[in-house]
Amino acid sequence: MTEITITAPDDWHLHLRDSDMLGETVPATARIFKRGIIMPNLVPPVTNAELASQYRQRILAARPQGNDFEPLMTIYLTNDTTKQDIIDAKAAGVVAAKLYPAGATTNSDAAVKALEALYPIFATMADVGLLLLVHGEVTESHIDIFDREKVFIDRYMSKVVKDFPTLKIVFEHITTKDAAEFVMAAPANIAATITPQHLLLNRNDLLVGGVRPHNFCLPVLKRNIHQQALQQAVKTGSSKFFLGTDSAPHEKSAKESACGCAGCYSAWGAIELYAQIFDEIGALDKLEGFASHYGADFYGLERNSQKITLVKESWQLPEQIILPNGRPIVPFHAGQTVSWKVK
Ligand code: NCD
Ligand code: ZN
C-alpha cells in the first residue's frame, strides 16, 4: 500500500505548555489533529474549572486562522481536590482528571501521595462522567525505574479498575508487555494510549552508542520485548488501544543537560511516524481505528467527519526548530527520514 485515507485523527494525550510556547505547539498539533486532550501539568498546575477555562482560551487564541482544533481540557488531581472541583469541572466542559503520582514526572510535585485518599473523588468522577487519566508509575526511590509501571499495576491500577467499574480510566502512555496484557484482559472501563516513541524505540535507542537525551521520556523506554508487545497490541486492532502522542516539548538546553528533562516533542511528525511503524509491522489497516476512532468512542464523543490522506513518500524532520522566544528545540526523530507523509 502506498496511500491511505483515514478519518482525521485526534491526540488523546498532549502537552502544549503555555504563554509564547503555544505559538509553536498549537499550530504544530493543529496541522493534523482535530482534537487534543490537554495535559494540565503547568506551573502551577491546572487544578480546577476556572484555570482550565482560562488555559483553554489561551490555546484557542494560538490557533492558526481558520483552524478548528478543539482542546479538550483536563484538571490535575491533588490531595486537595474536592468533589465540588469535579462537579464544577464537568459543568465547565472539562472531560477528564489526571492522576500523577507525586514526583513521577515533569511538574508533578503537586500530585497525589496517597491514592486511597482520592477514592471519594473517583466516585464523584464516575457519577458525573469525568474520565480518569493515569500516569501509571510508582515513585518510591527503591523501585527500579524499569519496574515502576508493573509495580503500579500490581499495587494500584488493578484495584482501582475493580473498585470503580463505572469509572472510565485511561492508562496513559503504556510502555510494557505487562501493561498491554493488563489492559487487554481488563473490563471495558479501561483503555490505554500508546506513544510513537514507545512503538518505534526501545531502551537501546536511549543508551547504545551514547546517551540520546531526545529519546528520553517518562515512562522511560523499555527493553525490546516490551516494544514488541506494544506493537502486537496495536496490531490486534483492539479498541482498547488508541493514539496519544505525549508530545512534550522542552527547550534544547533543558534536554541536552547534565540533568535532562523527560519528554519527546513529536507533534511535527506524529501521525507520519505512527503510519511508518504500523506499516513496518504490517498493520496499516489498523491505523484508522487506533488514530481516529477508538479514542473518540471511549470518550463518548463523535468521530471526526474530515479525512486525511497519507502517502508513502520520504521526507526529513528538521534538526531543530526555533521557538517563539528565539531559543531552539529539537523535535523527536530530528534530522531522520520518515517514510510516510501527509498529502
Ligand atoms: C511529560 C512532560 O514533559 O510534561 N514528560 C514525559 O516524559 N512524558 C510528562 C509526562 O507525561 O509524564
Ligand atoms: Zn504526558
Image: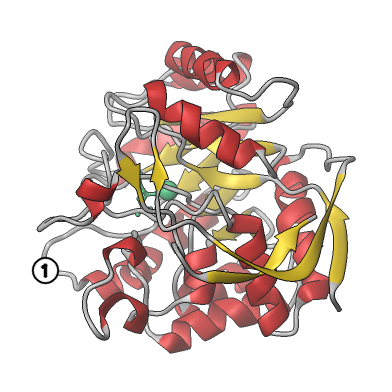
The residue sitting at the bottom extreme is: 225
Q: Residue at x 59, y 33 (%)?
A: 27
Specify the amino acid type for callout 1: His
Q: Position of residue 236 (x, y in %)?
A: 73, 78
Q: Residue at x 62, y 46 (%)?
A: 11
Please, is residue 43 above or below residue 290 in the view?
above
Q: Residue at x 46, y 35 (%)?
A: 16
Residue with the mark numbered 1:
142
Please tell me in which quadrant of the rendered image residue 280 appears. Answer: bottom right
Mark 1: is the Cβ under 8 angstroms from ligand 1? Answer: no
Q: Residue at x 27, y 24 (%)?
A: 44
- Is any atom of residue 18 visible in this view? no
Q: Label 1's element?
A: loop
The reply, left or right, for residue 39 in relation to residue 302 is left
The reply, left or right, for residue 103 in relation to residue 131 is left
Q: Position of residue 112 (x, y in %)?
A: 28, 40
Q: Quadrant of the C terminus?
A: bottom right
The one nearer the camera, 157 or 93, is 93
Q: How is the image coloured?
A: secondary structure
Q: Position of residue 289 (x, y in %)?
A: 79, 61
Circle 1: is it few (<14), some (14-19), or many (20+) Cα within 10 Å? few
Q: Position of residue 86 (x, y in %)?
A: 50, 22
Please tell me in which quadrant of the rendered image residue 3 appears. Answer: bottom right
The one nearer the camera, 268 or 337, is 337
The reply, left or right, for residue 76 in relation to residue 317 is left
The reply, left or right, for residue 67 in relation to residue 108 is right
Please, is residue 334 above or below residue 247 in the view?
below
Please, is residue 280 above or below residue 313 in the view?
below
Q: Quadrant of the N terminus?
A: bottom right
- Is any atom of residue 171 visible in this view? yes
